[in-house]
Amino acid sequence: MNSENQVRVRFAPSPTGYLHVGNVRTALFNWLWARHFNGSFILRIEDTDAERSKAQYEKQLMEDLRWLGLEWNEGVDCGGSYGPYRQSDRYEIYQKYAQQLLEEDKAFRCFCSEEELENHRRQRLASGETARYSGKCRHLSAAELDARLRSNTPFTLRLRVRPGTVGFSDLVFGRVEIETVQISDPVLLRSDGSPTYNFCCVIDDFLMKITHVIRGDGHLSNTHRQILIYEALSAPIPEFAHLSTILGPDGQKLSKRHGATSIEEFHRQGYLPEALANYLALLGWSSPNEGQEVMSLDEIAQQFDLSRIIKHPAIFDNVKLDWMNRTYIIKTNGNDLVDDAGEFFAEAGLVPAKLEPDVRSWLAQAIDLTKTHVDHLDQLPREAGIVYGFEKDPPELDADAREALGNPDGKAVAMEFMRLALEKESLSPESYREIVAQVKANTRQKGRNLFHPIRAALTGRGSGPDLERLIPLFETGSRLNLPRKVMSCRERLQAILGAELHELN
Ligand code: GLU
């Protein structure tokens, strides 16, 4: 822990592609750990790979993190006391520390050419040994060094690795120790002077006073090298927690084959950020309250503890994610869903792109009424189809509705309902109840025999949302100027029962 005793963690993505669930789970666990202690969450951009790093990815990853609710305390856009936070803006800092290590003889210049290193590597592999640097330039004499510098021979800067063992107690994987001879003297600066990931990472984590490094287990083997660099700098060594790779249900590394993997894709498909974040938190971590799964990020942060992270890989389960999303959709008010869901309705040509207040509030009610069976928001327009007009004229009835209207008793109920309804300007839940009572008295039908034909006559379907809530949506919707027409109750009854009406007249 640093002198202020404050937890400081960082998420350090390389902006070389879209954020996928693995990276984001790492960001989330860092954020939760910081939140748990009221500490700081730092966003550092690791763009040392100049060719593959793109400003567009940097922008998108910040949008994705914000969308999920993972705000950072320090970073490229908001600054902080330990900036700059983009590695390409920190080259002078790396050069300064490289120079210091060289002067202290903790690092040395290696003049071996690529070709030489490659030949050596091949020889070792051929004789069944692990590939390792020969150590050839570790102990050049002053004269040898001088000659190479004079002839401008290119060199890399390597850390002079000490003998013995190096290890650390990973908060997830436990004690991991190795003999340092297994490590080649790591390169700190390449021959063009550019710093390597391991070097930048240590300098940054040191200067940014990072207390816990929480990252993917792909970096476990880098950690030994990094610890040796900390030692050389006489810098405090942070705690480490490595997270296992997330696998698909088939046990293979999660990839495109398993469906959406980038956060932006999940966003586009209508997953709610709260649901996705909640689901991701359960990939490798679980609440101490057994069985508690649906939780807000703040609740999770309160309970979050690195010691509860499992070592074996978590499986990404789309079915469970859909269940989680459905749970959040059901418990979220239509007014809070309407902005995100509105985009899908607009795409389907059901509402204008810009929602005026009256359309907005009508749509929010339509969503509330039809959202119970959707897994993600992009399925809402299909479900909400019931509130719009009929696609065909005469309307196509489902089998249940045909059955309800196809027998004389059912037809009599529907016709009586229409006769009374057409006497009114429009229907309200109250007038609907009154009319139903009259139909009941006049036809002597009740229960299903009464309600089924009425539903069929208004919706063309045998089942669906509560009619008392649908009716006001039909009526108010029909007065809105929408790209696809909503039919009033009157229009619906006439469209469905129109043929019979002619017969009656
Ligand atoms: N830029 C590295 C990555 O995206 C970060 C590794 C680390 O957290 O140290 O894998």
Image (cartoon, rainbow, N blue to C red):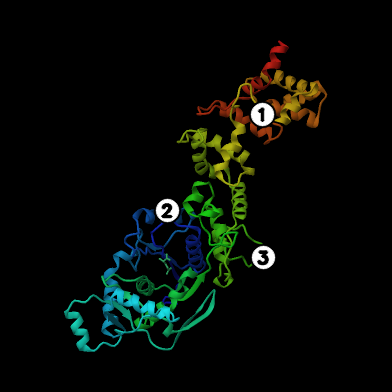
Q: Is mark 2 within 8 Å of ligand 1?
A: no
Q: Is residue 428 visible?
A: yes
Query: Do the residues bearing badges 1 and 2 touch, measured as CB atoms within 8 Å?
Result: no
Query: Counting other residues with Cα less than 10 Å from the Cα at mark 3, is it few (<14), some (14-19), or many (20 or more)?
Result: few
Q: Position of residue 214 (x, y in %)?
A: 48, 70
In the image, farthest residue toward the front: 126
The amino acid on which the numbered mark 1 sits, given as a three-letter code, is: Thr
> At x 61% / y 29%, what residue is drawn?
474
Q: Earlier in the sequence, mark 1 or mark 2?
A: 2
Classify the position of the N terminus by image quarter.
bottom left
Q: CA distance from mark 3 to mark 1?
A: 45 Å
Q: Earlier in the sequence, mark 2 or mark 3?
A: 2
Residue 287's place in the image compared with 350, above or below, is below
Q: CA distance from mark 1 to mark 2?
A: 42 Å
The amino acid on which the numbered mark 2 sits, given as a three-letter code, is: Glu
The amino acid on which the numbered mark 3 sits, given as a three-letter code, is: Glu
Q: Position of residue 491 (x, y in %)?
A: 62, 21
